[in-house]
Amino acid sequence: MINDYNCSASDILVAIGPSIGPCHFEVDEPVVRLFYESYGQEAEGLIEEKENDKYHIDLWQANVLLFNQAGIKDQHITLARECTYCDAEKYFSHRRDKGRTGSLAAIMQLI
Ligand SMILES: [Zn+2]
């Protein structure tokens, strides 16, 4: 939006739709290392250590941090906070359904 439409970051509104939540985005240590390489100390707030050398990562907040770094303020970011893994009635989930699943889509329009 900034590069192609010459928008100011202060005018951009962000919506992060349903997606896997921190309750279910489980990873191993190598992925955690990559998050520390990308986010530095801010990664600490994104990662929760679990049992059996597993970790849960908050991708919702990770994306908010990236938008903040691009100049978009928190008050311009809306998070659905709906975990697609948790709600099998409403959403497909690649992880929950072991890859045998559908896809999600969203439609947005510039007016
Ligand atoms: Zn969940």
Image (cartoon, rainbow, N blue to C red):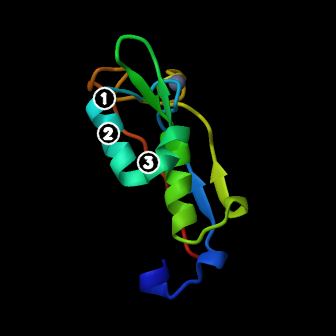
Query: In the image, which is nearer the foreground, mark 3 or mark 2?
Result: 2
Q: Is residue 81 left or right of residue 52?
A: right
Quadrant placement of the C terminus? bottom right
Query: Which residue corresponds to the image point at 35% horizontal and 25% vertical from the top-left?
Result: 95
What residue lies at 38% left-to-right and 45% top-to-bottom?
36
Residue positioned 37% across, 53% down in the render: 38
Mark 3 surroundings: few (<14), some (14-19) or many (≥20) residues within 10 A = few
- Give the crowd class for mark 1: few <14, some 14-19, many >=20 residues within 10 Å: few
Name the amino acid type tagged 3.
Answer: Ala
Give the amino acid type for the residue marked by disc 2 in the picture: Arg
* Label drawn at residue 33: 2
Q: Which residue is mark 1?
A: 29
Query: Mark 1 or 3, which is nearer the eye?
Result: 1
Image height of 55 relative to 57, above or below:
above
Helix or strand or loop: what does disc 2 sit on? helix
Q: What numbered label is drawn on residue 105?
A: 3
> Dividing the picture into quarters, in which one does residue 15 lie?
bottom right
Q: Establish whether ligand 1 lies closer than 8 Å to the Cβ of label 2.
A: no
Under tag 3, what secondary structure?
A: loop
Q: Is residue 110 above or below residue 99?
A: below
Contact? badges 1 and 2 (CB < 8 Å):
yes
- Tell me which label, 3 or 2, sits earlier in the chain: 2
Cα distance between the residues tagged 1 and 2:
6 Å
> Which of the 4 quarters of the picture holds residue 101?
top left
User: Which corner quadrant of the image does residue 94 belong to?
Assistant: top left
The vertical placement of 41 against 77, above or below, is above
Distance between mark 1 and mark 3 Cα atoms: 31 Å
Tell me whether the residue at label 1 lies in contact with that at label 3, contact meaning CB atoms closer than 8 angstroms.
Answer: no
Front residue of 24 and 90: 24
Residue at image coords 50%, 88% = 6
